[in-house]
Image (cartoon, rainbow, N blue to C red):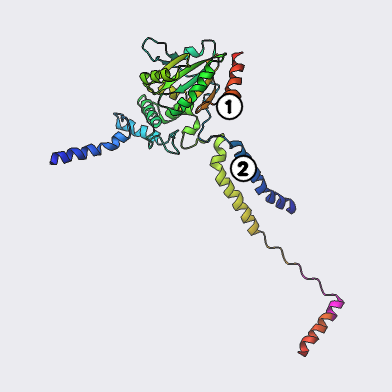
Amino acid sequence: MKSLFLAATLAFAALPALAAGLDQPLPDPAQEAKARAIAKEIRCLVCQNESIDESNADLAADLRRIVRERVAAGDDEAAVKRYLVERYGEWVLLRPPFEPSTWALWFGPAAILLVAGGAIWLRRRRPAPAEAAPAPLSAEEEARLAELMKDGDRS
Amino acid sequence: MKGQFRFLLAALPLAVAIGLGGLFYDRLGKNPSELPSVLIGKPAPEFDLPGLDPGQPGFATADLRAGSVTVVNVFASWCAPCRIEHPILTKLAGQPGFRLVGLAYKDKPEATKAFLAELGNPYALIGSDLAGRVAIDWGVYGVPETYVVSKQGEIMWKHVGELTDEVIARELQPLVEKLAQ
């Protein structure tokens, strides 16, 4: 009974490995870790914003296998990525590369913040325009004022 | 000077709105999950795929440089849109000026053969890519996909998803005619 329970537990424990598809980890742990790290940076093309490391899609499994193959063949990270970009374009990289065509993407938010912040700072720094001194009263107005004041005294 | 600055500030939201409007208009009617192929204008990858039967010729890079324009259709018996696309391919195959070649993607040869026996075989050649490796070299990320390859073996055009009469009339046909000259 106990051994049956153990067997069942082991069988269930193996399920996640099955779910990951026919993935065969590389025998060298260092290489496997490198392959996994690269896979985390590669977009699964048929999913929505998932890396091939997380995805269960068939194509993602195929791409994982290719990443492992390239790593086992001695390719470094840049070479593996170049291999995939040559086939699927830069979109395959989850993190866009830093180059002239992506400068707007990298600098855009900071530029907007700087321009908007600068505009607000400039506005705040400028002193509020001094209020123009009111023009002196004309003779007519003086007379009217005097009359009004007199009026006020009476009540 | 100050008036000018104010005018610019006031015009900014309008400029942004027009810019965004243009961008959205450009994307209108396009499928956002469709990726532009990086292989356009580049030579087709090197490959040599077996046929469906041991004796049968398969499909290799050399076939793309055999002197005619090639339309390469990536398909599979398990792919539902391929079934919908099939009558359109059959119609297309009857037209002159190019060779229609099939690339069976991750499909057991028996299943591909049954699929073609049921619906008819429009392909001049068929290569069986059971592992899906050659398809990855082509940048395939789903089936069906269709490519136009020039006489020199360069990939000129790619369509993701099933072909429609409209896509054929508007894009494929004019391109094939131009390349066939």
Q: Identity of the amino acid at label 2?
A: Leu
Would residue B77 appear left or right of B67 to someone viewing this image? left
Both on one chain, marks 2 and 1? Answer: yes
Residue bearing mark 2: B20
Q: Is residue B27 above or below residue A120?
A: above
Q: Give the number of the mark in front: 2 or 1.
A: 1
Q: Is residue B164 above or below residue A107?
A: above
Secondary-structure class at tag 1:
helix
Residues rendered magenta in the picture: A132-143
Residue bearing mark 1: B166
Q: Are marks 2 and 1 in contact (CB under 8 Å)?
A: no
Q: Earlier in the sequence, mark 2 or mark 1?
A: 2
Residue furthest right as drawn: A139
- Give coordinates of residue A4: x percent, y percent: 15, 39
Q: Quadrant of residue B157?
A: top right
Distance, label 2 to label 1, CA atoms, is 29 Å
- Give coordinates of residue B80: x percent, y percent: 44, 28
Q: How many numbered callouts?
A: 2
Q: Is residue A82 visible?
A: no
Would residue B125 appear left or right of A26 to someone viewing this image? right
Q: Is residue B97 above or below residue A6?
A: above
Residue B99 lies in the magenta-colored region: no
Residue furthest bottom as drawn: A154
Q: Residues within 10 Å of mark 2 (few under 14, many from 20)?
A: few
Residue A5, label in figure: none
- Give coordinates of residue A72: x percent, y percent: 35, 26
